[in-house]
Image: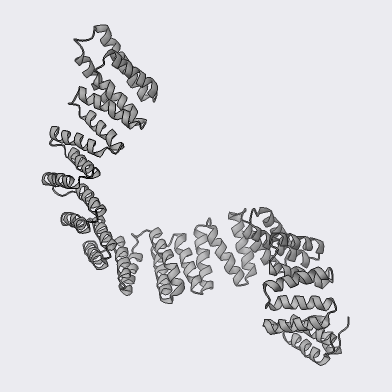
Amino acid sequence: MALFQLSSGQLMAQKKGELTEDEQVRLTTLFINAEKEHVLGNVEEATRLFQECLTLDPDNDAAYFNIGKIFLELDMMPDAATYFEKAVNLDESNKWYWLSWAQALIAQEKFEDAAKIYSKMTKRYPNDVQLEMDYASTLLQAGDAKKALKEFDKIELKTGPTHDIARRKYQYYINAGKYDDAANEIEKLLDIYPGDNQLYGMLAELYKAQGKIDKAIMVYEKAHKAEPTNPYIQLSLAEFYDRAGRRDTSYAFLKKAYNNPNLDIDTKVSVLLKMFKEAEQYPKVRQQAIELCELVINTHPGEAKSYSVYGDYLNLNGQQAEAIVQYRKAVSIDPSRFAIWNQILFLDSEFSDYQGLIDDSEKAIEYFPAQPAIYLFNGIAHNQLKQHKQAVISLKRGAELVIGNNFLSAQMLASLGEAYHELGIESSSDSAYEASLSYDPNNAYVLNNYSYFLSLREERLEIAKEMSSKSLEIEPSNASYLDTYGWILFKLKDYAQAADKLKNALENGGKNSAEVHEHYGDALFKIGEKDKALEHWKQAKELGGENPALIDKINSKTLVD
């Protein structure tokens, strides 16, 4: 508002002799109302009122200037430039008119015209360093680098080297591919500001872009000497020594940075995550990463990230028991991280720690009640512990929560089918398995289980045979699937084919299965190889077979249908 008030005063002084007193009052009222509408955001009304001012006083520079400002705000740069130029022509002494005109021209990328304006202004205001800076920068944009650099040099004679000038010249030299000149600009500033780490970084990055890694290292070594406890310099040295192939030196600086509490945890974790792919391939890198994780815990013991990333590396290193301890520490600090809970549940499952899986999944459900995968883990654990009623409750709830994930739906329903089977609710078991296969018709595991359960009940054996055959098309060497198919053939009284498939099951990893030996013994008995049948029944018993019928077969040396 101060600028508008000044303009109004100038207007009144200028036209005293040319306007009547009534006209002067009307002009002042129009101008003030126009300013008010502009401030309120009513630009159309403000423009109309300023135009009325011009109708009353066609040579009113302030009205032209304010209309130009409105066009500038509306991004109507050609119109803005036109009105600013008229304001300048009416009052060449107003610095703001000139500056606004130049601004409108630059917005249209008319850099040469803008540079001419700045040239005139620097002559009018010879002590305004900012004007000279803007003039030199506009010359650069206009493509007159030679003249621009001379202007920057003239400014430096007045001010000495400054960050602003050096950065502008540096950027020009970079864009022009004049890397040595760019380096010289930064080195000049470093002579004046030897503790400016940002300058060291710019110079090192410049050398890196040129492939001059040794020079980049020298730059950061100087920075490190000036500030030996700065973790970001330590981290940069680690990076550049690694690029130079000096891995031990790189790791030494990396350890310094990680042992430094002033390096934020997000940076530390970010570097560790970048190392993960290499750590998967190289044990030495993996061990170094584990050491760094331990340093992160020492320096950031209250951060969940410290323990979760440590858990990731321990897991990668085959130390799953230690990994789950770290994951549990992470969720004790921040239980809102689903990915960590997921890792815990996977490890519980991997360890076959089904009570642990129940306990951990129930805790996870408290924080993520709408995550269906947690209910799947919980249901599987209850099934494994023969707690099938609880499994049904969890799995039904989980199935209701699945949206748009056929794979998860199929798994949930397959586990539900197993639970219902164990509870003897066969119609619900069949429905669950069939629903599972509708989501994933090529799931060999589900095809095998469903067909096996049908064979145990001796129901729909031809359908069971078809499903079992399909599972073997997917995994032809799976001993369990071969056993199922052989057993279905046995139930269909195709004893010779059954014996053949069950023999294949033994040859493909089923030698340690009591069930496969018992089934094979039954098939052998049916094809007349009674002595061999007895041998396999005995092997089944030695492997832990506790089926009462198995004991009867061994004692009686016969198979009773």
**Looking at the image, which residue sits at the far left?**
157
Where residue 296 sits: x, y (%)? Answer: 40, 65
Horizontal side, residue 337 vs residue 496: left or right: left
Establish if 30 lies above or below 210: above
Residue 89 at x, y percent in the picture: 21, 24
Give residue 127's quadrant in the image.
top left
Residue 322 in the image: x percent, y percent?
51, 72
Say if 92 sits above or below 306 in the image: above
Q: Left or right: 526 with respect to 194? A: right
Q: Is residue 102 left or right of residue 552?
A: left
In this rendered view, identify the residue nearer to me: 8 or 372. Answer: 8
Measured along the vertical axis of the image, is residue 442 above or below residue 88? below
Q: Who is closer to the viewer here, 386 or 280?
A: 280
Give the residue at x 31% y 36%: 108
**Residue depicted at 52% across the width and 60% down the height:** 331
Residue 361 position, x and y percent, is 62, 61
User: Compared to 509, does 297 lie above or below?
Assistant: above
Q: How is the image coloured?
A: one colour
